[in-house]
Amino acid sequence: MKFLKGTKVYSILTGSCPVCQSESMYVEPNPYKLTNVLAMKERCGHCSTKYKIEPSFFYGAMYVSYPVGIAFAVTTFVLSYLVFNLDLIITYCVIVVVMVVSLPIILRTSRNIWINFFMSYKKSKANLKL
């Protein structure tokens, strides 16, 4: 995934700092440790970017999580109903299971997308060495 380094896509998919992309924004890298799924560091240890720009900054990520969840649900529907030809009831159950299982990933991805609306990657001499 190093070929995407320097793009917003890299920051969104890896959950790394949107400014330097040198370290993760999250305290716990594993999104399935549910006690810390949304626990974020205050600042980036590499470039000192403050992640929470203002109080309640990440409430806006709720608006992003809806289309992200819809994308997961539609993909599940297409795969289960149209590709694997499962019944509609079974397809519905599969969608529910996928949505519950992927909730931590949807939450983090939404936050990553939201913060990348407001911050951009900045090349520095330290980043060029990576």
Image (cartoon, rainbow, N blue to C red):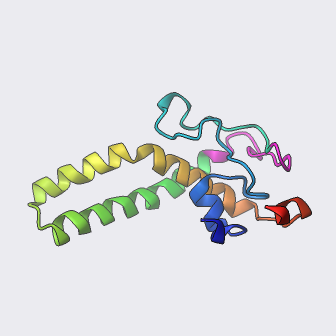
Please give left or right for residue 115 compared with residue 30 in the image: right
Please give left or right for residue 1 compared with residue 93 in the image: right
Residue 71 sits in quarter: bottom left
**Number of numbered markers:** 0
Viewer-proximal residue, 113 or 3? 3
Residue 112 sits in quarter: bottom right
* 106 versus 36 height, above or below: below
- Determine if residue 126 is in view: yes
* 9 versus 54 height, above or below: below
Residue 77 sits in quarter: bottom left
In which quadrant will I find the N terminus? bottom right
What residue lies at 73% left-to-right and 39% top-to-bottom? 55
Please state the horizontal and vertical placement of residue 96, each as a whole percent of the image: 26, 48
What residue lies at 60% left-to-right and 36% top-to-bottom? 28
Magenta stretch: includes residue 76: no
Please state the horizontal and vertical placement of residue 18, each as a whole percent of the image: 72, 57
- Determine if residue 113 is in view: no
Question: Which residue is the extreme one toward the front?
Answer: 129
Please give left or right for residue 8 compared with residue 121 in the image: left
Part of the protein shown in magenta? 45-58
Please state the horizontal and vertical placement of residue 130, each as a whole percent of the image: 78, 61
Please give left or right for residue 75 compared with residue 26 in the image: left
Please state the horizontal and vertical placement of residue 57, each as a whole percent of the image: 68, 46
Viewer-proximal residue, 18 or 52? 18
Main SS of residues in magenta = loop
What residue lies at 50% left-to-right and 47% top-to-bottom? 107
Question: Which residue is the extreme one toward the top?
Answer: 35
Question: Which residue is the extreme one toward the left?
Answer: 87
Question: Which residue is the extreme one toward the right?
Answer: 125
